[in-house]
Amino acid sequence: MHQAKIINLPKILDERGNLSFFQNEDHLPFSIQRVYWIYDVPGGEVRGGHAYREMQEFIIALSGSFDVVLFDGKDEKKFTLNRSYYGLYVPKMVWRSMENFSTNALAFVATDSFYDEKEYIRDKNTFLNEIHDTK
Ligand code: TYD
């Protein structure tokens, strides 16, 4: 799990309202190719539950809160995201689930690739086999 990490973003405090941002290479260890977001998640639902072969992600709770659970084939770690001025960097080949969404949670995700279903490993045993093959 050594590569997964919380990245703190700039926070421009202003009495008119605060502002945060990230831009290519300055704050993330990759260049952004695509963004997507997850919203209107019914209580108790779990999203994700897969790994990416090469893709990396940066996940922010722009609103509300949720947990991201990461599993690298050996260790599991839970990150609670609940502020919009930091996010979680998720490297490739980590199994990740998103759960415990609050009402009105908005999960914003930046990635380094276009959407490609071939990037996904959706079966946990396949993930375990592939991760052991690469080590
Ligand atoms: P998926 O990443 O599988 O979400 P989750 O793992 O949380 O269920 O995406 C759900 C569907 O959305 C998937 O079938 C394909 C589509 N999708 C796109 O077309 N483009 C995208 O950028 C993403 C993230 C998903």
Image (spheres, helix red, strand yellow):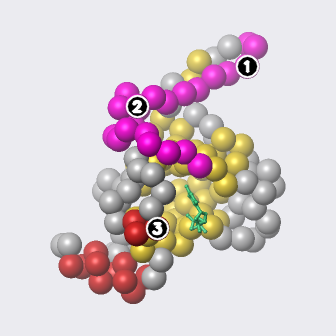
The numbered mark at residue 39 is none
Numbered range of the magenta stretch: 15-36
Which quadrant holds residue 35? top right
* Dominant secondary structure (helix, strand or loop) of the stretch shown in magenta: loop
Query: What is the distance, in whole Å, between disc 1 and disc 2 at their CAs?
Result: 24 Å
Q: Secondary structure at mark 3?
A: helix
Residue 76 percent coordinates (x, y): 43, 70
**Residue bearing the label numbered 1:** 17
**Residue bearing the label numbered 2:** 24
Q: Amino acid at mark 2?
A: Asn
The reply to whether dot 3 and dot 1 touch (C-beta < 8 Å) is no
Q: Secondary structure at mark 1?
A: loop
**Residue bearing the label numbered 3:** 117
Q: Quadrant of the C terminus?
A: bottom left
Q: Mark 1 or mark 2: which comes first in sequence?
A: 1
Residue 90 percent coordinates (x, y): 42, 54
